[in-house]
Amino acid sequence: MRRTLFVVAAVLALVPSFADAQQPRTLTGRVTADGTSEPLSGATVQVVGTALGALTSDDGRFRLNVPDGAIQLSVRRIGFKRRTMEIAADRTTVDVVLERDALKLEELVITGQGTAVARQNLANDVASVDAEALTKVQTTSFEGALQGKVPGANIQMNSGAPGGGGQVQIRGITSINGSSDPLWVVDGVIVSNDVLNPGITAVTRASGLQPQSQDNGVNRIADLNLNDIERIEVLKGASASSIYGARAANGVIVISTKRGVAGAPRFNITQRTGAFASLRELGSRRFTRDEAIAEYLGTGKLFVNDTARLLQLYGDGSAKNNEKNFFGETPLSYETSVNASGGNENTRYFGSVLHKYDGGIMPNTGARRQSLRINVSQNAGSRLTLDLRTAVMRSKDQRGLSNNDNSGTSPYVVFSKTPDFFDLRAANGVFPTNPFERSNPFQTMALSNIEEGVDRFIVGGTATYQLFTSQTQTAQIRLDGGADRLNQHDAIYTPPELQFEPNDALPGTTALVDGQVQNANLNAAITHTFSPSGGFLSATTAIGVQRELRNVAFANVVNRDLIAGQENINRGTTPLLQQQRQPTKVFAVFGQEEVLLLNERLLLTGGVRAERNTNNGDVEKMYYFPKASASYRLPSFAFVNELKVRTAWGKSGNQPLYNQKFTNLTNTVYAGVNALRVAPGAGDPNIKPETQTEIEGGFDASMFDGRASLSVTVFDKSIEDLIIQPTFAPSSGFTNRFTNGASLENRGIEGMLQVTPVRFRGGEWNTTVIYQKVKPKITELDVPTFRQGGFALFLGQYQVEKGKSPTQIVGLVPTAENPAVSAAAIIGDATPDYQMAFTNQVSFGPFSASALVDWKKGGDVINLTTFLYDASHNSADWNTGGSERFAKQGRDTRPYVEDGSFVKLREVSLSYRIPESFVQRAFGGQLRTAGISFSGRNLLMNSDYRGLDPEVSNFGNQALNRNVDVAPFPPSRSFFLSLDLGF
Amino acid sequence: MTAYTTVAGVRRTGAPRRRVVAFAAIALAVGATACKDAAEPDLNNPSLEGVQTNPSRVTVTQMTRGVLEGYRQNSGFPLAFSIIGRDAYNLQSAEPRNTGELLGTSPLDPGGFGAAFWGGQYRTVRTAEVLLASLESSTAVTDQEKETVRGIVNTIKALELFTVWAAHDTAGMVIDVSGPPTETAPILCRDPAITAIAAILDEAQTQIANGVASGFPFTALPAGFANFNNRATFTTFNRAWKGKVDVYRRQYQSALTALSQSFVDTGGGSLSPAQARALLDRGPVHVFSASPGDALSTLFAALTGTVRAHPSVLAGAETGPNGIDARYTAKVTTTTSASDQGVSSNLGFIVYPTNTSSLPIIRNEELILLRAQANHGLGNVDAASRDVNFVRVRSGNLAPKTHATLDDLLTDLLYNKRYSLLYETGSRWVDMRFHNRINQLPLDLTTHRVHANYPVPANEWLARGGQSGCAAQ
């Protein structure tokens, strides 16, 4: 530590010894687009070799103080190719025309804290998704907007519930018991993507009464307003992300929000209106009268000998479509988004307001989002730039009941049990009592109140101070950081009169969760660039420190046996209380060197981060995460305009979770006295971060005059000191313990091909194909093979075994010698064989159309929803397959572990942009732009999977225990019509 | 500290003042954040380490209560035992294993449902071992008090081990849990295992005898032990269990001796029905409460819920001059019909009227029947018959029976054990197995069979590097 500080001090001491910059002169000019002569706002104009720069205003104009003498001026803007031009000593004005850059080679990609590299030089494959791709089609979830757009990321929703809940897994499984979540950074602020479980288990009893992972919770990235986002970059593994340290092993998602553009105020309004509709239904068995009698009458059957009762319920036996009726809601959904931007050379602002409502297909469900953002950039003098970004968000979700259940309340559990000849809908305002299961979902959802509200505030800022600029050197200090604070409040109320409520003799349930997440981080970095004249070298050095504080806490209460009509938690007789706090403190020091050589053709990068963290067993120990990379741009040959070959190596970590180092006692109250017992799980006092070493290599080629580009990357990630939770012999009194005891390897390939097959004046057709494949393998395991996740061996579990895929699914299979005897065998793997996505965009004059198709090949799912239907002899295919499947249950798990392959039409959009000249004439200049579009999401799904949706996770966001399907919230498709207006 | 050095370093270069300020800001940031973060204890739970050395009297009380709490938490086993013993169903569609696997549609899965009655019980035993080990170092507790703690804790430990034994029978079980968790103790076969449990009860008796007569640590016992919380009365509880364990290890003479030192009592002279009921119900109980943090009954089953009595409970109940067996009417009632996977019932249990109803740990009624079982084992038909008839008349309100043969006696004894202990001890399954009558349990469907015992859990074998048999010694 002492030595690191000394280095920082030494650098600080050196910087001021440089000579002061020369006296400035003023250069003004205008930047326009090639062909259309459209003025380009927000372009960066910079004096090469210095930090002197300016942004163009909305009429494309800029004003810049430049040193005396001849200079080189570099002009760049996202979407256009960079241009560098010589400016003679006597010139004070210049006009610059930029060519379009379809392949986005000029984009600056943030590669470290305080440094960025142009995409054309980047040594890592960093995926980037821009604002247009994010918001072209309305989405109910943040993750949904990324699906099919990031090569190397497996993005899956946990269910179809409105409001989100999904997982981004980058380059395969990276952990088993650690966090599986990438690090999310918004404008330099490390933001929370925690899930605070809402506690519906108090009703469903999926596992006890206290909040737990089967509650279908929302990971909180869902609070962000997608319309505010300028760009998302995905750093995929340790070789790119090591500078972010011990939470970066799962990748880093770097989000930049929009910044103001200098000029007169501009407003954009988008109004979307649409609806959601059920995407798939399971259906259920059609009972003939005889079948109903056989099923429900007789000794040991539901109605024993009460024929009259059964026949009365059977009625005419017609299909009552309970499932269809229940999930048949299509409430009006809408999104109103307004943003404003403007300012001058010194002060620029961006502000936005969002009000959005996504109605759910289950009664009384939906998700509301409100957000207000103000981003301000201020130049204070010529050296200091301040950037302040604030956003206030309010989310309100009603997600109903779903997932696993032991109380007969989760709708699909009820439908699995209820034959379709019995109508569950209310007749004359009275909900029928369901004789086939303990509840009637129509009644439950009509009378219950299940709501989650989140208030969130994210504030971030950057202060950049130019210490020094000269023709050859610049140095700046950059302070950035911020805070993310959210309060989540879940209230669940199921009144005493519901059919299932008396079953526990405590009619009426109320549950309250109050959660807080506080994140704060501060980075301080010094960046120095050295670019001697001649252009053979440009070196950027960054060194800095980082502090991060995090606390996830919640308190919850469950009370039952309520006074009629009273929701408050003190109105019951059996309160249960719980509180959890999980603070973490991180301190890190980092340094990075980037050298651009040979006319910006060769980029060499090296860096290291040292970090300590209070979740580690040894809180004082620094862990080191180095990285190194190289890229070289080959000059053009044949049809190849440019070919870049690249390779990168790095280490990154995955912090232990808060509780993994502690061995505890649990306490319960027994007749008024605290009773202490050993806790079933033991911690490891020496726990350390999982460390990932990744090496990747690949090439990026731009061909046919920029009409085609191809990127291919292969990677090999090896993760050591994997935190596993091996089981003790249960006779020890402990069930398991945490320990660093395994290694995992992920090898894979990913690629992206972009082609513009047709281009003519006024129109073009762009097509993009993404491919990814990853193969994980457990390479070391210090303990015997163990099983994890799922419910039981005969219902399918994951088996962690040396030399095998960590996501392999184990179940019972009859043995070859004696089919009456079953034994554990591997029967599937949740990791997909490969995934592909196809995007096509056609534009012709004011019309444009696009479609995104997402294809997952392989990846098995444990389908227990079908198991539930089969167990009640109620599956749609009972007579043609269900009975056969169920006859094997308990002996053969294979019928319930299914291939989860799918092809989904993720996004479709058709838009028409009303010609600007017409708009401006028609509205007398009041209106600048206008467009109208139709969009749809998840319109079609093609999958042989028997359940609702192979994109499912009963246990929510999990490193390993995903792809378990138990009565989920069903998927939906959505349609929206939008009107975009610009003032 | 470090920050000042940095500022001084900057000054030496003679840089302008504003630059110094900027540097100082960064340097201060470095200095401030470089301070060490202390290792903090778990904010959410008490630590194991904290109780391992020199426990206070409060800690000893709380750990003792923890052992009893573990036993209470595990007191729900009679439901599963009653399902396998065809006294009950749990018709829970969301958990089809209750009416599938438990009724024998498939073998008990050692990786799932079949892994029950093992880890939970050993957790209590481990808690007991942690307390027994840490007690040695306690300076707050006198040597005599330590003996009492040991006596109490070892008694409860034996009861937990008995649950494991009753569930696993010939599959075997672990007795010694005092070693480090990474080392596995041998799995003893049925007979050596129950012999070891009997020995623990004897050891506990001696420890109680060496301990204090009353007061602390007996005050560490919860309210359900109100009449069993001094040296003399706790010993009768210990001996009651020794008697029960001896019956199942076929040491009938020893069982009679132990039972004679227990609180078994058939009263004297004439008893009113209410007095008889009170006498039969004597014994310590688990108490439950709805207070925050406390537990609700492990066996309470709402009539509207999924637990039902097996139809054979009604079919098998005898009718005497005063009507159907009074134990049936006291414990079972008609409720809504429920079904799952081809079985159904409209009979619900009212053994525990509310979710805070106490759950007997061992009752005088059981002790009388255990004495009959021991006498039956010794061929003392008259003595056994007397006890069986006492229960028939006093508890079942039935006419007494003449037991002509040992087999008749056993049949009636098992009938009475079934109805006296219905949905209370789950002993029907254990008794039918013990007396080789498991094939007499009724099967509802041809796909059903009666599991003879639970398997050793899969994780137990995994930790031992593969499956093998139990150790005969």
Image (cartoon, coloured by chain):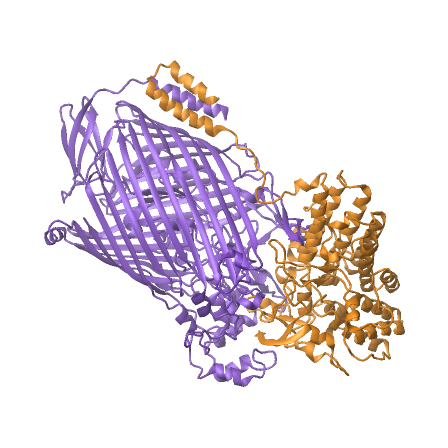
Q: Quadrant of residue A822?
A: bottom right
Say which quadrant the C terminus of chain B sits in.
bottom right
The percent coordinates of residue A961 (x first, y second) are 51, 54
Q: Is residue A912 visible?
A: yes
Of the chain colours in the picture, the one used for chain A is: purple
Q: Is residue B145 above or below residue B334?
A: above
Q: Nearer the viewer, residue B198 or A394?
A: A394
Q: Nearer the viewer, residue A832 or A797?
A: A797
Q: Is residue A430 above or below residue A461?
A: below
Q: Does residue B109 appear to the left or right of A978 in the view shown?
A: right
Of the chain colours in the picture, the one used for chain B is: orange
Q: Quadrant of residue A559?
A: bottom right
The percent coordinates of residue A166 (x first, y second) are 42, 53
Q: Quadrant of residue A699?
A: top left
Q: Is residue A379 above or below residue A452?
A: above
Q: Is residue A165 visible?
A: no
